[in-house]
Amino acid sequence: MTPGARIAAAISLLDRIASGDPAERALTNWARANRYAGSKDRAAIRDHVFDALRCRGSFAALGGGEQGRALMLGMMRAQEIDPDTLFTGEGYAPTPLSASERAAYEASAPEGVAELDWPAWLRPILQADLGDDYLVISQAMRARAPVFLRVNLARGTRAQAQTALANEGIIAQPHALAETALEVTQGARLVQRSQAYLTGLVELQDASSQAASALLPLAPGARVLDYCAGGGGKALAMAAACPQAQIFAHDADADRMRDLHARAKRAGARITQRPPGDPGEGYDLVLVDAPCSGSGTWRRTPEAKWRLDSARLSELCALQAKILIESSTLVAQGGALAYMTCSLLRTENEDQLNKMSDQGWTAEIASRFSPRSDGDGFFAAVMRRSR
């Protein structure tokens, strides 16, 4: 495919996503219907689509609209690419610019474009919650997220993992956020086919998530429950950090844990799955990695930020409070309740701790991890009963 044809494909996909089709499904269906497109074509088109979703507000302002064609025009303007080299109408390339499109492209650029890439209703909330970091984080969230790996120390050291990856064309470097974290700087698309991954030496996990997991009070013999386990990333991290602990995983939807058994086997981890609605009790540590807005991960899932609204955020906050109350009853005397979100919002983080304070719980650790450190936005707290 020519560069222009890739732009045309991205335009059609963005219009499909705007009509309600989830991005991943739209990309998968497009690839199945256009099997002539090679892996490099698919990767380039995917990058165009996700760049436009991350920067939809600013690209729309720069390109004169929110349709796929305008977003691609805005992307070219942001990247200082001459649109006449791609909007040629030749072959499968988009047709040349109209007079109105050229006027939009040549108009004065708006100020503060980074802020435009947050939903308008959320901007004042984020500005209040992030304070002096608001503009820096706004800019950081417009870029593609780094690819991080967690080294499974039960399988090898970080240096050994680097060497194993390098032997397969994957270059990774240690990251300061966590002693298990590697940032992939070259060959990211090879990771899931690599022997280092397939043999459980490394797992895909964001560096902030790894740093948050390192705060958990794990001890040999402790009974530990990952209450909202999902795919089991935190359960696997805890099992690797303390193999002598007894790790249990539970989720309200068992299907979310369908890959956990295979992942645990690959990692050499022992994790006992509990059925939905039967999490057990008397745990030394209960971790609640709560359903949330995901605002700290919107570089990876950018369409989610445009679909969140205030009503859904309120629903999520109510669900988080409910889950915290439920899970707190599963903690043994003297045990700890940990709470995590991948959210930047105070209402999902500190405000939930304040609600638990009213229930007799005191936070002994509460940490925010910022995209300024390259990882996702993340929040982690460890609480114990104060009465």
Image (cartoon, rainbow, N blue to C red):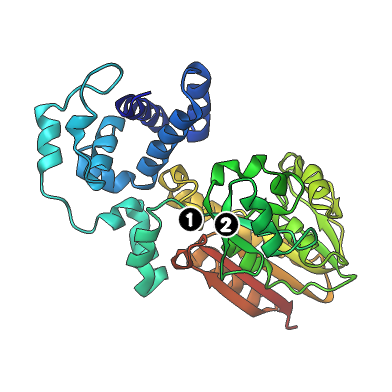
* Residue 308 versus residue 21 in the image, above or below: below
Residue 383 is situated, as x and y percent measured from the top left of the image, at: 69, 75
- The tag earlier along the polypeptide, 1 or 2, is 2
Q: Looking at the rendering, which quadrant does residue 349 occupy?
A: bottom right
Crowd band around label 2 with a 10 angstrom C-alpha radius: few (<14), some (14–19), many (20+): many
Image spot of residue 62 (x, y percent): 21, 44
Residue lying at 49% horizontally and 46% vertically, measured from the top left: 301
Residue placed most toward the observer, 120 or 232: 232
Percent x, y for residue 227?
A: 75, 57
Question: Is label 2 in a helix, a strand or a loop?
Answer: strand
Residue at the front extreme, as displayed: 167
Q: Is residue 353 left or right of residue 11?
A: right
Residue found at the far right of this picture? 221
Query: What amino acid does circle 2 point to?
Result: Ala
Q: Which mark is residue 295?
A: 1
Under mark 1, the amino acid is Ser
- Residue at 26% from the left image edge and 23% from the top image edge: 94
Identify the residue position indicated by label 2 in the image.
Answer: 172
